[in-house]
Image (spheres, rainbow, N blue to C red):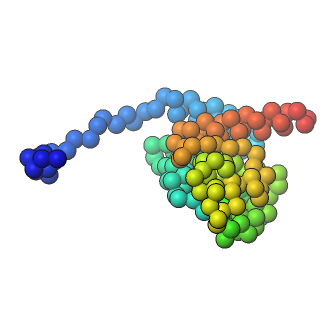
């Protein structure tokens, strides 16, 4: 990079690209998800996020779901602080040896029936860290994973699409049992 470009980058005004404040696809997914949640639970869906040894990439995307842009609470999804209040545990990261017992205790603290959803390639068992000496592998090595949302990391919209597919699956299973 030339000196002129460097100086230009330092002193020229910076313009951000235009930001769209409305995402039609996001709203369609969210409204479909809200409909599925209402049919399965008749109330909102409570999710407990569990990090079993990740690089925090998937957690950042999960946190984005609570920002004003995505605002998933308007679609009936809330993140709870305790597994005792959760319907679903979303697990991120490959399960490390040091976190295995905490992961099991968190799962057993969740009221049943409860579900486990693996988010991200490491939790799904296909990540880079799964062959490490300190890692047991994906979440399905120690928990009954009901659904997987792959990606490294999946975007908030992909997570919502995955949750929609998961809720549709749960509704169909519930209908089959009835």
Q: Position of residue 147 (x, y in %)?
A: 72, 43
- Horizontal side of 176 relative to 129 (left or right) equals right
Measured along the vertical axis of the image, is residue 150 above or below residue 47?
above
Q: Residue at x 22, y 41 (%)?
A: 15
**In the picture, residue 76 is in which quadrant?**
top right
Would you place residue 37 above or below residue 87 in this image?
Answer: above
Please give the count of numbered marks on the rendered protein: 0
Quick check: can you spot residue 99? no
91 shown above or below 16: below
Please report the residue visible at 73 percent of the width from the left and 69 percent of the height from the top: 101
Q: Position of residue 132 (x, y in %)?
A: 62, 61
Q: Looking at the image, which residue is at 34% across and 37% down?
A: 19
Q: Quadrant for residue 171, please give it.
A: top right
Query: Image quadrant for the C terminus?
Result: top right
Q: Is residue 15 left or right of residue 144?
A: left
Residue situated furthest right in the rendering: 178
Question: Is 141 or 70 nearer to us in this picture?
Answer: 141
Q: Residue furthest left?
A: 4
Question: In the picture provided, is 47 more to the left or to the right than 146?
Answer: left
Q: Is residue 52 left or right of residue 176?
A: left
x, y percent for residue 142? 77, 58
Residue 58's spot in the image, x, y percent? 54, 52
User: Is residue 58 visible from the viewing direction of this image?
Assistant: yes
Q: Which residue is found at the position 60% from the left and 50% from the top? A: 127
């Amino acid at each position: 990079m030339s000196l002129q470009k460097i100086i230009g980058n330092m002193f020229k005004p910076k313009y951000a690209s235009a930001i769209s404040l409305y995402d039609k696809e996001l709203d369609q997914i969210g409204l479909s998800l809200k409909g599925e949640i209402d049919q399965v639970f008749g109330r909102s869906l409570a999710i407990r996020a569990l990090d079993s040894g990740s690089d925090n990439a998937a957690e950042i995307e999960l946190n984005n779901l609570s920002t004003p842009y995505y605002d998933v609470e308007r679609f009936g999804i809330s993140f709870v602080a305790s597994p005792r209040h959760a319907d679903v545990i979303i697990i991120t990261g490959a399960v490390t040896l040091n976190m295995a017992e905490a992961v099991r205790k968190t799962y057993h603290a969740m009221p049943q029936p409860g579900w486990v959803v693996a988010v991200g390639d490491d939790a799904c068992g296909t990540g880079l860290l799964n062959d490490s000496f300190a890692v047991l592998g994906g979440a399905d090595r120690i928990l009954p994973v009901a659904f997987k949302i792959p990606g490294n990391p999946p975007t908030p919209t992909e997570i919502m699409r995955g949750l929609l597919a998961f809720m549709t699956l749960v509704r169909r299973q519930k209908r089959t049992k009835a």
